[in-house]
Image (tube, helix red, strand yellow):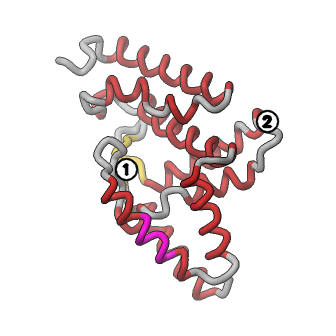
Amino acid sequence: MEINALFNALAVAERLKNNTRHSWTSENRHESVAEHSWRLALTAYFVKDEYPGLDMNKVILMCLIHDLGEAFTGDIPAFEKTEMHEQTEADLLNRWVASLPRPYCEEMKALYEEMDAQETNEARLYKALDRMETLIQHNEAPISTWLPLEYELNQKYGKEQCAFSPYTKALQEAVCKVCVEKIQTEDPEGGRS
């Protein structure tokens, strides 16, 4: 990539360092979108032995780019995101991807199409891990940062996406168990107090 084009692409990606998510860290500060994407990619790397038949480099790329649209819109929690939000984000992202030089515009467009279609195991794995990384982060954050609706939501979020493989199903169950234990230990009233 030509240097000025690289600078321009990285300037968009840098916004994800400043855009915070609904999630909090264990040190009681808002997590950035970039931090979530980085740890999601690391998660994919760490589970590669569970998926020897998958193109894990593709999964890691999906993890790295999956929230680039939030460079334009900011993070909107899943429980607040509407179809209109999703369409606006997709339109802005597609416009930016189309502006990238070749081969990056074609490669990223193909990745986003595969991710959206959710027909390959690579896309399914990225989506399942995305859900689980979010919940793992919630479990690591102080329970005082949880909204009342998250006590129930965090126990079922991602269950559908994780059902595609035995490993992700077991991961979802383990994450849910940690969630329940956290609620019982840190807030036995379950957000009702």
Name which of mark 1 and mark 2 comes first in the sequence.
1
Label 2 residue SS? helix
Q: Position of residue 191 (x, y in %)?
A: 24, 21
Contact between labelled residues 2 and 1, with CB atoms less than 8 Å apart:
no
Which residue is depicted at the point 59% across and 52% down? Answer: 63
Label 2: few (<14), some or many (≥20) within 10 Å?
few
Residue 93 falls within the magenta-colored stretch: yes
In front of the other: 83 or 158: 83
Label 1: few (<14), some or many (≥20) within 10 Å?
many
Question: Residue type at mark 2?
Answer: Asp
Q: Position of residue 180 (x, y in %)?
A: 41, 16
Mark 2 lies on residue: 49
Question: Residue type at mark 1?
Answer: Arg
Q: Is residue 51 above or below residue 123?
A: above
Q: Is residue 113 above or below residue 184?
A: below
Which residue is depicted at the point 76% across and 33% down? Answer: 50
Residue 168 falls within the magenta-colored stretch: no
Residue 113, picture quadrant: bottom right
Q: Which is the main secondary structure of the residues drawn in magenta?
A: helix
Segment tinted magenta in the rendering: 90-96
In front of the other: 15 or 173: 173
Q: Quadrant of the C terminus?
A: top left
Tell me if 111 is positioned left or right of 152 in this view.
right
Label 1 residue SS? strand
Mark 1 lies on residue: 21
Q: Quadrant of the N terminus?
A: bottom right
